[in-house]
Amino acid sequence: MTSNIIYTSTDRTPYTYFIRWNTLGLNYYGRRTANRCHPEELFISYFTSSKVVADIIDEFGMPDIIKIHKIFSDIDSCKIQEERFLKKVNAAGKITWINQTNGDRNFDTTGKKLSESHKQKISWKGKKHSAETKLKQSQSAIGHQRCLGKTHSTETKLKMSISSTGNKSRTDLPHSTETKLKMSVSAQNKPKILCVHCEKYFDPGNYGKHHGLKCKITR
């Protein structure tokens, strides 16, 4: 997702964020400084590095509040902000905060290579959410309006286009025959949507691009 993004730093946009479960009365404050990180990834492809947060999501679903707090142009400022905030609220000393420390700039893995055993411990490969968890996540996402109505400016779109030029992130990663078959079956099983203007049914992708309010009959 973030391959089309212009970064505040050379190869990343460090940021701090705040999440909260209203029904549980629990809060969490964290930072993200990894290579290629960007605020738009939060709870889209990045769900914090906290195992405690992961366990709560698995049992109770997504947080009610997901908020980017501050954005930075360098890693050190981001680390300092996280520590300053956590110390101010004394997160480690309060039961309403999930954070187990008040920040430690010396404990950081940015730019460091993880061992294979460490990678296996934190990897989600082969792990699956239970049906109950999936249902909770689905219900939590209903009515989510974090990006509703937001559009990129022409200038931003141009920057994203320039940034993505020559991007080869998937050039050498073709889908297997089995994957292609699964994708085909999945596409065929998607419910069709009726366009009230031309009175024809379309898959969700084509409907959103060419029908509904965009149907040529309405022009």
Image (tube, helix red, strand yellow):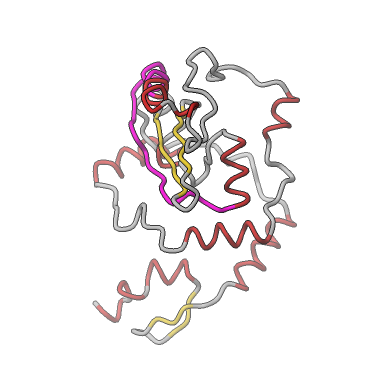
Quadrant of residue 51 in the image?
A: top right
- Residue at the (53%, 20%) spot, across then down: 110
- Seen in the image, is 1 located left or right of residue 57? left
Quadrant of residue 178 in the image?
A: bottom right
Percent from the top left, x then y, of residue 116? Answer: 74, 24
- Camera-side residue of 95 and 165: 95
- Camera-side residue of 121 and 6: 121
Indicate whether 190 appears above or below 39. below
Percent from the top left, x then y, of residue 166? Answer: 46, 35
Magenta-highlighted residues:
60-81
- Seen in the image, is 3 located left or right of residue 196? right
Residue 80 among magenta residues: yes
Percent from the top left, x then y, of residue 72? Answer: 34, 25
Indicate whether 201 appears above or below 183. below
Percent from the top left, x then y, of residue 131? Answer: 68, 61
- Seen in the image, is 22 located left or right of residue 172? left
- Residue at the (75%, 25%) spot, across then down: 117
Q: Residue pushed farthest top?
A: 106
- Residue at the (57%, 59%) spot, across then down: 136
Indicate whether 22 appears above or below 173. below
Residue 68 among magenta residues: yes
- Residue at the (67%, 33%) spot, across then down: 122
- Camera-side residue of 167 and 6: 6
Q: Quadrant of the C terminus?
A: bottom left
